[in-house]
Image (tube, grey):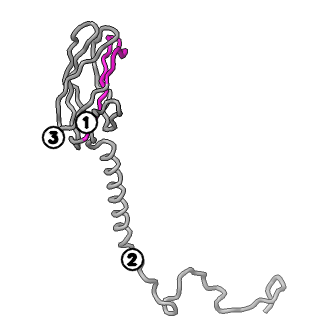
Amino acid sequence: MSQPDGTQGIQRSDAAAPVTNHRPTDRYGTRPAVNRRWLPLALGVVVVLLGCGVAYLGYQKYGPKDIEFEQLGYTVTDDSTMTIRMKVTRKDPQQPAVCFVRAMARDSVEVGRREVLIAPSTSGTIEQTTTVKASSRPASSSIYGCSGQVPSYLRAG
């Protein structure tokens, strides 16, 4: 057959059939259902593991320390002396510790400092009083920190 434009046309029965993206089920069967029940379980496990990691890091940073200290009070004895009372709690009371205390003037300038040896004891928590000599009249005090690494010059013997 001749087309109006002068070309020979080919007649096919499927030429007018619409093109579809569907697989013929009689030839290939139906597509198996995708089982995604494992996805919420896997996400739940990941969330729990991340939560445990964050809790562990928080406990390491903000949890109980090996040595904890608290200032109980201070007394200005005279123009160059201050007495400081403190409480120290150690995880292992058999190990010595050192605490750094300081006396400060009214303008918060440090005017005196002392390293205090916390000797081994049978009690985990002890109270200790120490005297700090100052270069000028002290007005307040603080405990700078405590450590389990005692310098050799503070150890007895």
Circles 1 and 3 in contact, beta carbons < 8 Å: no
Of residue 39 and residue 92, the one placed in the foreground of this image is 92
- Check disc 3 and report its element: helix, strand or loop: loop
Q: Residue 54 carries which label?
A: none
User: Label 1 crowding class (10 Å Cα cut-off): few <14, some 14-19, many 20+?
Assistant: some
Using the rendered view, name the quadrant where residue 95 is placed: top left
Residue 37 included in the magenta stretch of the image: no
Q: Mark 2 points at which residue?
A: 35
Give the mark toward the camera: 1 or 3.
3
In the shown orientation, is residue 145 left or right of residue 29? left
Q: Mark 3 points at which residue?
A: 122
Q: Name the residue under label 1.
A: 68
Mark sitting earlier along the chain (3/2): 2
Kindly identify the residue that appears in the image at 80 percent across and 84 percent down: 4
Give the answer, above or below, for where 11 lies relative to 78.
Answer: below
**Identity, as a three-letter code, of the amino acid under mark 1:** Glu
Q: How far apart are marks 1 and 2 (CA)?
A: 54 Å
**Identity, as a three-letter code, of the amino acid under mark 2:** Asn
Q: Residue furthest right?
A: 6
**Identity, as a three-letter code, of the amino acid under mark 3:** Thr
Of residue 63 and residue 98, the one placed in the foreground of this image is 98
Using the rendered view, name the quadrant where residue 129 is placed: top left
Give the answer, above or below, for where 132 lies relative to 38.
Answer: above
Mark sitting earlier along the chain (1/3): 1
Quadrant into which the N terminus falls: bottom right
Circles 1 and 2 in contact, beta carbons < 8 Å: no
Query: Which range is magenta?
Result: 95-114
Across and down, in percent, residue 43 comes to: 37, 63
Residue 108 included in the magenta stretch of the image: yes
